[in-house]
């Protein structure tokens, strides 16, 4: 099926069940499309199936629409795990058929979605294609989220953050260990910025890593006159060097 037809079906599905006038619904709708196109684009580079990647990108956040509508939050711990919920809905309504996903690929879609919002890949994909799609979704999701964060939120955060606020030690220690931060450890605005910066530590594919690295440079540049980020920059720069060395 053509991508435009899949996109039209996704619009129909979301607009019939949810209110696209709600800015949070609209933002997740745009994010879903964005991830779908990123998935299709980068699938070619890593040898994955671009059509399957596109469908996975479209469907990966289906649970978000229900979560926002009925729980008014994006916080999984305070509501539902949006990946588990979305995956169940896809199974219950057999959306595989509606989105032209072959039975052979259904488990790949399910596993990629279930793994997309967890700290690590918890459900091991059983095929090579499944592993590629799972890792690709985790990378493209982060890329799309960072893009939105830079466009919409980071400047606001910079303005609103008091001078006495500090990055918490747990967040900094995690950055020093080159590990992805956990959202539950965010205690203030600066922690939130660092949480998103730590995405750089959890990127699978080099081609996406390069994009993420340029987003992180933009973020560090926004805070370049803020001494609280000096140590963060040192951690990230040293990680970049280590990663480069490993590639050589
Ligand atoms: Fe998600």
Image: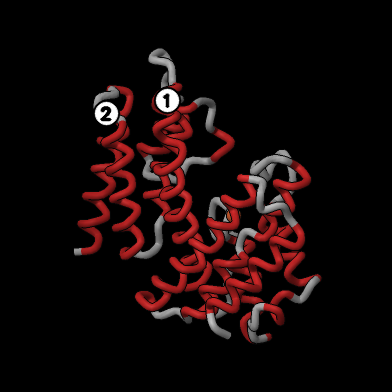
CA neighbours of label 2 inside 10 A, class few (<14), some (14 to 19), many (20+):
few
Q: Is residue 178 visible?
A: yes
Count of numbered tags: 2
Query: SS for tag 1?
Result: loop
- From the viewer's side, name the closer residue of 141 and 173: 141
Q: Is residue 6 left or right of residue 40?
A: right
CA neighbours of label 1 inside 10 A, class few (<14), some (14 to 19), many (20+):
some
Measuring from the top left, give residue 185's x and y in whole percent: 54, 33
Measuring from the top left, give residue 172's x and y in whole percent: 40, 31
The residue tagged 2 is 230
Q: Is residue 153 left or right of residue 246?
A: right
Residue at 45% over, 60% down: 139
Residue at 40% over, 72% down: 41
Q: Determine whether 71 is above or below 44 in the image.
A: above
- From the viewer's side, name the closer residue of 57 and 166: 57
The residue tagged 1 is 167
Q: Is mark 2 within 8 Å of ligand 1?
A: no
């Amino acid at each position: 099926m053509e991508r435009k037809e899949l996109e039209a079906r996704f619009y129909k599905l979301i607009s019939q069940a949810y209110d696209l006038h709600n800015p949070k619904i609209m933002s997740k709708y745009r994010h879903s499309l964005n991830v779908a196109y990123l998935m299709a684009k980068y699938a070619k580079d890593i040898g994955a199936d671009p059509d399957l990647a596109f469908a996975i990108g479209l469907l990966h956040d289906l649970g978000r629409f229900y979560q926002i509508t009925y729980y008014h939050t994006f916080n999984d711990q305070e509501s539902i795990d949006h990946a588990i919920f979305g995956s169940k809905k896809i199974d219950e309504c057999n959306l595989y058929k509606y989105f032209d996903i072959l039975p052979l690929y259904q488990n790949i879609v399910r596993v990629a979605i279930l793994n997309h919002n967890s700290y690590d890949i918890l459900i091991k994909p059983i095929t090579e294609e499944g592993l590629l799609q799972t890792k690709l979704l985790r990378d493209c999701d982060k890329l799309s989220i960072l893009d939105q964060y830079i466009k919409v939120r980071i400047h606001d955060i910079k303005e609103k953050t008091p001078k006495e606020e500090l990055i918490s030690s747990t967040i900094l220690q995690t950055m020093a260990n080159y590990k992805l931060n956990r959202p539950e450890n965010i205690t203030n605005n600066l922690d939130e910025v660092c949480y998103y910066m730590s995405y750089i530590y959890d990127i699978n594919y080099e081609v996406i890593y390069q994009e993420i690295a340029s987003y992180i440079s933009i973020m560090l540049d926004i805070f370049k006159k803020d001494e609280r980020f000096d140590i963060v920059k040192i951690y990230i720069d040293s990680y970049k060097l280590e990663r480069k060395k490993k590639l050589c």
